[in-house]
Amino acid sequence: MTALLGLAAFALLVYFEICKCAGVKKGRASFNPWFIAGTAVLILTWVLLFARNTVSAAPLRYVGAVFTAVSVFVYYRVLAETSKEAAYTENRLIVPVYKDGTYSKMRHPGVWCFAAVCLGITLIIPGAWAVNLMLAILNLVYCILQDRYFFPVYLEGYEEYKHEVPFCIPVKGR
């Protein structure tokens, strides 16, 4: 059940991207609730994992809780960097690509933060490792789809950015 919810969450996120790109191609921006819906279903997936699984022993549980909290904070900070350019929040057709901060070192740094959140939750709920691994892989696939198909449509300058900045792994000298 939780695996299906996780799959549905990423399906909604991909649908968000498809709708956003369709709006650009039609020349009109519109409210697109699918990002919020996908995020809510993803959070529900984790809530159900906590409700249905046994929590690990005290030391590991606390390490997992701290690791998850720090990972969520870092993930939020990384995503908050892009809000300056309003890629997800502003109702405009095309917005400029954000190239500063963490995003000047690698494209999609959130992949690592999301994987760290999944790892932290796995430390708290060892029985949920398969669902968390699936979610981390789905997030990577989602980022690959964004990188290849969606971002070039609605982020101005993304093709050049792809040639300047590596995908997911910061490489020195590039």
Image (cartoon, rainbow, N blue to C red):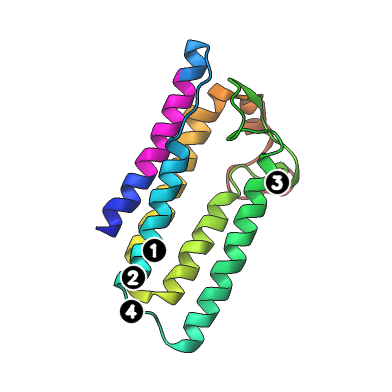
Quick check: marks 4 and 1 in contact, CB under 8 Å? Answer: no
Q: Which residue is mark 2?
A: 51
Name the quadrant containing residue 10.
Answer: top left
The x and y percentages for residue 120 are 50, 69
Residue at the spot of label 4: 54
State yes or no: residue 27 in magenta: no
Front tag of 3 and 4? 4
Residue that mark 1 sits on: 47
> Which residue is under mark 3?
105
Amino acid, disc 4: Thr
Quadrant in the picture for the N terminus: bottom left
Report the mark closest to the observer, 3 or 2.
Answer: 2
> Magenta region's main secondary structure?
helix
N-term mark: 1 or 3: 1
User: At numbered mark 1, what does the secondary structure look like: helix, strand or loop?
Assistant: helix
Nearer mark to the viewer, of 1 and 3: 1
- Residue type at mark 1 is Val
- Whether residues under marks 1 and 2 lie with C-beta atoms below 8 angstroms apart, the answer is yes
Compute the Cα span from label 3 to label 4: 39 Å
In the rendered image, residue 140, in percent from the top left (x then y), is placed at 46, 47
Vertical comparison of 134 with 147: above or below: below
How far apart are the alpha carbons under marks 1 and 3? 33 Å
Q: Which residues are magenta?
A: 10-22
**Quadrant location of residue 173?**
top right
The span from disc 4 to disc 2 (Cα, nearest Å) is 8 Å
Nearest to viewer (mark 4 / mark 1): 1
Identified at 38% across, 56% down, the residue is: 44
Q: Disc 3 vs disc 4: Cβ atoms closer than 8 Å?
A: no
Mark nearest the camera among 4 and 2 is 2
- Under circle 4, the secondary element is loop
Type of amino acid at the residue the image marks with label 3? Lys
